[in-house]
Structure formats: structure tokens, C-alpha cells
Image: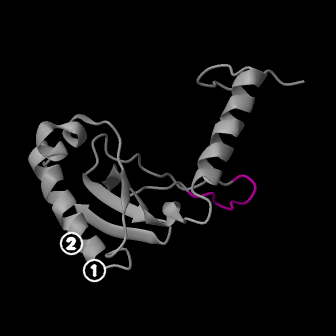
Amino acid sequence: MRKLFGRFIPHHLTQANLDRRVDDSITLLTLHAGDRWMDRLITGDEKWVFYDNHHRKSQWVGEGESPQDVPKPDLHPKKVMLSVWWGVDGPIYWELLPEGKTITGDLYTTQLRNLKKAVDRSALKDKKVYYQHDNARPHVSKQVKQ
């Protein structure tokens, strides 16, 4: 026997809640039967990307030998923020922020304009596009909504 911890879940769902989720999903999927609206869905997000990802690799060592030492990575490695928007066919537009910059309402508005130009050059140019983004402060600012 091993001593293990239970897995954390956001909250406990009753069987009625699970059934309601299935019913709602089926309703949404059948509501637009024949319309491939998910092909026109664009999702965006930001991610910190490290310049150098250190990986410790396993080493084959003989009996009585010691593996080679691997230095720890820096405590504060260099990283850059990647903003990316994608659809069902893959990435549509991505942008690396300059070092030291963060997402603001002005910058996000500029990124959305650049995204629109990329969509206008893609197969989605003459179709109604649905855009999904999270509720981060710059994403819901008054300027972005306008």
C-alpha cells in the first residue's frame, strides 16, 4: 500500500449538475445544426516564454560512478511574453512583446487591430468571426470594448 493524496477538484458536482451540463451542451450543439460556427471561433491568450529552458536528462552511469552535476538555472531567467490567437486550423496571429512591456489597454487594442488584419488575409475574411478572450483587466477596458 502507498500513502497518496486525493486529487483537488474545483468543486463537487452532483449527478443532477452533470446531467444538466450534458443537456446544455447538446442544446448548444443542436441549436446551430449544420452551421460550423466553431470553425469561425478565435481564442487568444498570453504566455511567458523562457529564453532558455534547462532540462535535467537522465544519464547512464556504471556501478560505483556518479552522474555529472547539472547547475541550477538562474533564479530570475530571461523571459518574454507571447500573445497568440488561434482557431481550429492553428495559429492565426502571434506577437512577442518587447522586453519589459506588459499588456495594457492601448497595447491590446493595437494587437486586436493587427489580428483583424491577419483575419482579413485568411480564409475567414468574409465570414462572421466569434472571438473569445479572458476577463483580464486590459482585455475588458473601455478602450478595448469600443
Residue 53 belongs to magenta span: no
Label 1: element kind = loop
Where, by quadrant of the figure, is residue 1 drawn? top right
SS for callout 2: helix
Position in image of residue 48 (x %, y %): 32, 49
Residue drawn at point x = 59 percent, y = 47 percent: 28
Q: Which circle marks residue 9 in the picture?
A: none
Viewer-closest of 66 and 113:
113
The residue drawn where x is 41% and y is 46% is: 72
Task: Identify the mark at residue 117; answer none if there is no mark.
Answer: 2
The dot on residue 121 is 1
**Looking at this view, is 32 or 130 the one in front?**
32
Mark 2 Cα within 10 Å, few/some/many (few <14, many 20+)?
A: few
Q: Amino acid at mark 2?
A: Lys
**Observer-nearest residue: 119 or 61?**
119
Q: Amino acid at mark 1?
A: Arg
| In the displayed structure image, the side of residue 93 where residue 18 appears, left or right | right
Q: Which residues are magenta?
A: 57-64
Residue 59 is a magenta residue: yes
Instruction: For the residues labelled 1 and 2, say whether their Cβ atoms are less than 8 Å apart.
Output: yes
Gap in Å between the C-alphas at discs 1 and 2? 6 Å
